[in-house]
Image (cartoon, rainbow, N blue to C red):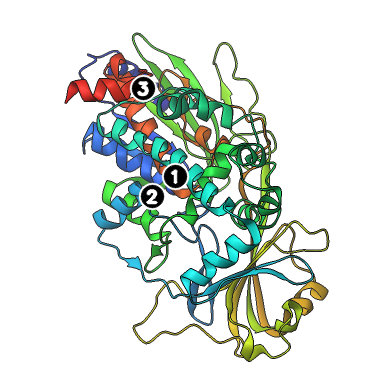
Amino acid sequence: MAGAALLLITLVASAAASRDTPPRKIAVVGAGIGGSAAAHFLQQLFGPRVQIDVYEKGTVGGRLATITVNKQQYESGGASFNSFSLHMQDFVKLLGLKQRREIAGKSAIFGGEHLILEETDWYLLNLFRIWWHYGISFLRLQMWVEEVMEKFMRIYKYQAHGYAFSGVEELLYSVGEYTFINMTQRSVAECLLEVGVTQRFIDEVITALLRASYGQPATMAAFAGAMSLAGIQGNLWSVEGGNKLVCSGLLKLTKANVIHARVTSVALHNTEGRALYQVFYEKEDKMHSDFYDIVVIATPLYAGSNSNITFEGFQPPFEEFVGSFQSTVTSLVHGYLNSSYFGFPDPKLFPFASILSTDAPNLFFRALDNMCPVNISATFRRKQPQEAAIWRVLSPQPLERPQLKSLFRSYYSVQTAQWQAYPQYGSRMATPLFALHDQLFYLNALEWVASSVEISSVAAKNVALLAYNRWYQDLDKIDQKDLIHKIKTEL
């Protein structure tokens, strides 16, 4: 106890030092992509001398994870990224990783009794089929998504110039003004109907796309939906060797001290000039604690979450984080697909590598994919439907034996990963704060309006810049409005 008291006295003296002095120690709670990216950005800003401790009770990578089947690894969490994922592209280059080549495969949408829409090998024929079924709804969807993403991409320019935001609402307003804020209060269906997309297209295509990505219908909030639907633009890609390599690579590059422990609470100690935070954690059934100048929470905080982090000594006390998460089960099945279930009695004639599903009441799965391993050799080919392959099934609940027998003629193994994957996006979403206290930050705040690996990376960069600007009292770089005009003036 005497040693801890002496350490506290030393840290208090350090905290009261000149504002030109960089922080001595930073804690990041969570080693998923958000926490790993935050550690990287914080070290970039504050320099290599700052000590960064990253607490992780599970496996580094969080919701970026793999499952091994027959000595090959397959993605069981976040599987792919789109062309808008600029931070992820930068991480891959920085770490000397490679984008994994994609093996082409056709998709279809299943309505519970038959296939509603089937992709072919001919691009023009695909466009004609969509036009024949849905008119120009697809074009109007593309225009809507492009407009949203063009505005959202402003955040990269703002971050490159060092600007940060203390709350989600401030960030959304900076890139999309009230349009984006309103999109957190309205549904995808409502916004798309307004721009001329038909109800049929929403029910059959939009719903299938959203179920595959978020496991939620078109009644979900429009902003989260638009971020998800951005995947229809451009090519999808993933990381050779597994997406989780980005997390471990960033932590290694940062020389972060990874502490495998469960953080239980964060306590505030008032000091002269600066706040000081005591992080309590459980490791090997023993309680420990350490003191930090800056703390970043990079794990979900909500009533009933696995985090269960409490905050002590803060006045007024923090309000309880309201919300719930969507449970998603990833099942990797090594077996023979029952193509008859989809209307193809002869498996050799089944041409699809991916099946999306509508919101039909009798459907127990959301999507089905013929998976490729995270390492693909030059001679690799995707297994044919009549061969035993690795299929990924996304479902709201673990698959029961009769359900597996519906989808597969026979199978060798089933391995599952159950995720609290992303918030449940009602059509009226809260916009929480990144800044919980002077130097205590909640990175996952942005997840409450949209969730993806890239969104977490954007939040990580914002929190790092917010911590840096607050530490050095550069308030002109925080919550500034009309940044497009300001940045043009600076140039």
- 351 on left or right of 274: right
Q: Where 101 falls versus 39 (above or below)?
A: below
In the image as oriented, which residue stretches furthest toward the top?
A: 272
For label 3, the residue is: 6
Residue 284 at x, y percent in the picture = 54, 49
Q: Which mark is residue 85?
A: 2
Relative to 137, residue 477 above or below:
above
Disc on the earlier residue, 2 or 3: 3
Q: Earlier in the sequence, mark 2 or mark 1?
A: 2
Frontmost residue, 357 versus 319: 357
Q: Quarter of the image holding residue 131?
A: bottom right
For image coordinates 48% across by 69% down, the residue present is 124
* SS at mark 3 in the image: helix
Foreground label between 2 and 1: 1
1 and 3 marks in contact (CB < 8 Å): no
**What kind of residue is marked 1?**
Glu
Residue 436 percent across, percent down from the top left: 50, 22
Query: What residue is disc 1 on?
Result: 146
Query: Left or right: 278 with respect to 246?
Result: right
**Residue 335 drawn at (x, y percent):** 65, 83
Disc 1 is placed on an element classified as helix
Camera-side residue of 19 and 359: 359
- Residues at discs 2 and 3 in contact (Cβ within 8 Å): no
Front: mark 1 or 3: 1
Lateral position of residue 359 relative to residue 227, left or right: right
